[in-house]
Amino acid sequence: MTRQTRAFDDDDATTMMPTTTRTRTRTMAITTTARAAARGGRAPRHRARVGTRRRRCVEPVRAFLGGLFGGSSATNVDADAVRKNERECVLQTYGRGETEVMVRGKGCKLWDAEGREFLDFTAGIAVNCLGHSDEGVARAMSAQARTLVHTSNLYHTEPMSTLARKLSSTSFADKVFFCNSGTEANEGALKFARKYAKSRAQANGKSVEDAAYETVSFENGFHGRTMGALSLTWKEGYRAPFAPGLPGNTFTPYGDLEAAKNVIVKGKTCAVFIEPVQGEGGIYPADAEFLRGLRKLCDEADALLVYDEVQCGLGRTGKLWGHQMVQDAEPDILTVAKPLANGLPIGAVLMKDKVASVMAPGDHGSTFAGGPLVCAVANEVFDRVSTPAFLQNVADRGNELKSSLAEKLKGHPHLVEVRGAGLLVGVQFDVPAAPLVKACRDAGLLVITAGKGNILRLVPPLIVTSAECQKAVDVIARCAFDSLK
């Protein structure tokens, strides 16, 4: 099986030398530098010969390791072998088929094994907020990897505690629980809500057996693939193969406050889960009055309001947090994951003290969660995404994208609507959008669908430029008129 190893440089070759050789080499380097300084900074005349000798050391090492591990450079990947290995050795849950083998990325662009360039408006499904191969992310990752990667949660580490301070100080939250993905974050939120309901039952003189345990979530909502989060997810095709799910969840129409009143019941409902902007379900931003109404209903029922911001949080809407689009509708719990470490696995549950106070040591945990490596990268991401200028650019590019799409697609016979928030944009048609996705990919633009497959979902890196937005709009418009007739 083909594996990719990183390229070795001269320093790698030096560190693989015997100790006496390394010492002698370093001594020569120090002496050479001192002599150069004595000559007024002139470069040593034998520098080129030294560089040649060192390169001769590196090449055999690189060749040996490449043969040992089957490594290959990003420009020398056998795409057919990759697909064969994936088809024969990887569980077939993704249906990749004969899609491209991606080998390299930079900014908002990707390149496949054949060298074709793509403008990426998927960003790893709203994950790569700073784009591909970001230099700041690479520096943070490299520095931390050389220092400390993993300790478990038995000990304190600085990157995690610093990140928790940043997340809590810029949101409604008092405490943070770290995990490894969005679905894990929602599983944690479910557990915290159940424990909170038990504490409320005891405070009201009831037994824990009589505590509220039911949940409410919304039609077209998506909350993850693990059993608890899956039970909150609307799409029957995701749930049916693994039924029965977690008992006690009720689905209600998104945006219908009157319907929500009938299913949020004091003494029965422990939590209401909602995405402030639905992503997978079709790019539907919630109405401000609807969210305020839910906040009021949850207060009256002593139920927790949980915002799933796995896709719409951390800058995607043009606000740092999705709930900040609406005043007077703060959640009790918020889940975040996708963009937080620009592609490294991380998730988090943000919560108010009233929730955190019911949790005790041992109530929940994770071996890998909040590790120094991923949190160091998340700190780098957060520091850049949270600046006003960055968020303003997201808002501006989102408005530009929506208005340009509406203009260029005007008159299309199957266009229903262009909508979204920030750089979470949906283009709804009254026919399946799969032919449009394929046509765009053939034209060098990567996009995906949402909803029932009739919505084009655009979630580019948050660093996308105006020129890149206009290029994407031109491709989409041309392909839409050609492929959706």
Image: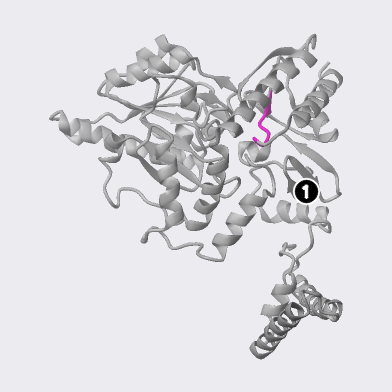
In the displayed image of the protein, which residue is found farthest to the left?
A: 205
What residue sits 53% from the left and 42% below the top?
382
Indicate yes or no whether the magenta region holds residue 82.
no
Quarter the C terminus occupies = top right
**Circle count:** 1
What x and y, as percent, mark residue 476? 79, 24
Amino acid identity at mark 1: Val
205 to 105, vertically: above or below: above
What x and y, as percent, mark residue 81? 80, 57
Is 46 left, or right, of 382 in this rendering? Answer: right
Indicate yes or no whether the magenta region holds residue 461.
yes
Q: Residues within 10 Å of mark 1 (few under 14, many from 20)?
A: some
* The residue stretch that appears in magenta: 456-462
- Residue assigned mark 1: 101
Q: Nearer the viewer, residue 211 or 275?
A: 275
55 to 354, vertically: above or below: below
What residue sits 73% from the left and 32% below the top?
465
Helix, strand, or loop for circle 1? loop
What residue sits 49% from the left and 48% below the top?
180
